[in-house]
Amino acid sequence: MDGLTLALADDLPELGDLVPDEPFWRYPAGGGPGREDVAHLRVWLTAGPEPGYLAVVTETGLAASVTESAGHIRAGLARRYGPAVVLLEHHLAPELAEGAETLDLVRFGADGSPHWSRVWPTPAGHPRHAGLERWMTDYGYRIVS
């Protein structure tokens, strides 16, 4: 499981309507000013008691570019959608198995550094698995399909 801790299902919002679906979304890439890369961006309104957004960035190019640019991506999304945006990183994970994918929650510490928690896939025997699988059934499989 790459040594990632598992997310808490309570940290993942209920999804409302899909706002934009941008298959060729340009974002500032880490590694230098003026560098850009492309990913698939989908943003949903959240349906919980607090208004907000859930943004899912799917890697479409180099395997590490979204990960390396998480801070820039989060800053751009916050400018566009406000501070109440939850960020998920979705990418193919051929190192796990052919056709494998992962979905990770990206959180930011007080110093602005990103930290990832695995949402999917999760080990069946883990205490957080049932809650995460329920969220995946309700919302997550729509995100990764």
Image: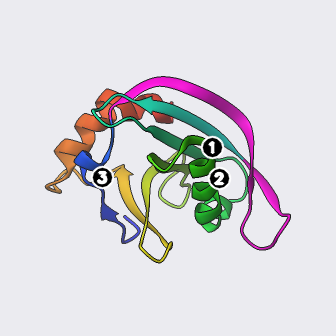
* Quarter-of-image position of residue 47: top left
Give the SS element for disc 2. helix
Measure the C-alpha gap from mark 1 to mark 3: 31 Å
Report the magenta stretch's main SS: strand
* Quarter-of-image position of residue 21: top right
14 displayed left or right of 16: left
Q: Which amino acid type is marked by label 1?
A: Arg
Q: Does residue 37 sit above or below 138 in this rendering?
A: below
Give the SS element for disc 3. loop
Residue 136 lies, in percent from the top left, at: 33, 36
* Quarter-of-image position of residue 23: top right
Quarter of the image for the N terminus: give it: bottom left
Residue 126 lies, in percent from the top left, at: 17, 57
10 displayed left or right of 54: left
Measure the C-alpha gap from mark 1 to mark 2: 6 Å
Residue that extends furthest to the bottom in the rendered view of this protein: 111
Q: Which residue is mark 1?
A: 80
Q: Does residue 49 sit above or below 66 in this rendering?
A: above
Residue 33 highlighted magenta (yes or no): yes
Q: Which residue is mark 2?
A: 76
Q: Which amino acid type is marked by label 3?
A: Thr
State yes or no: discs 1 and 2 in contact (Cβ < 8 Å).
yes
Q: Which residue is pictured at 21% across the width and 49% down the height? A: 129
- Magenta highlight range: 14-38
Crowding at dot 3, Cα within 10 Å, few <14 / some 14-19 / many 20+, comes out as some
Residue 96 lies, in percent from the top left, at: 47, 58
User: Residue 103 versus residue 101: which sits nearer the camera?
Assistant: 103
User: Residue 132 versus residue 80: which sits nearer the camera?
Assistant: 80
Q: Which residue is mark 3?
A: 122
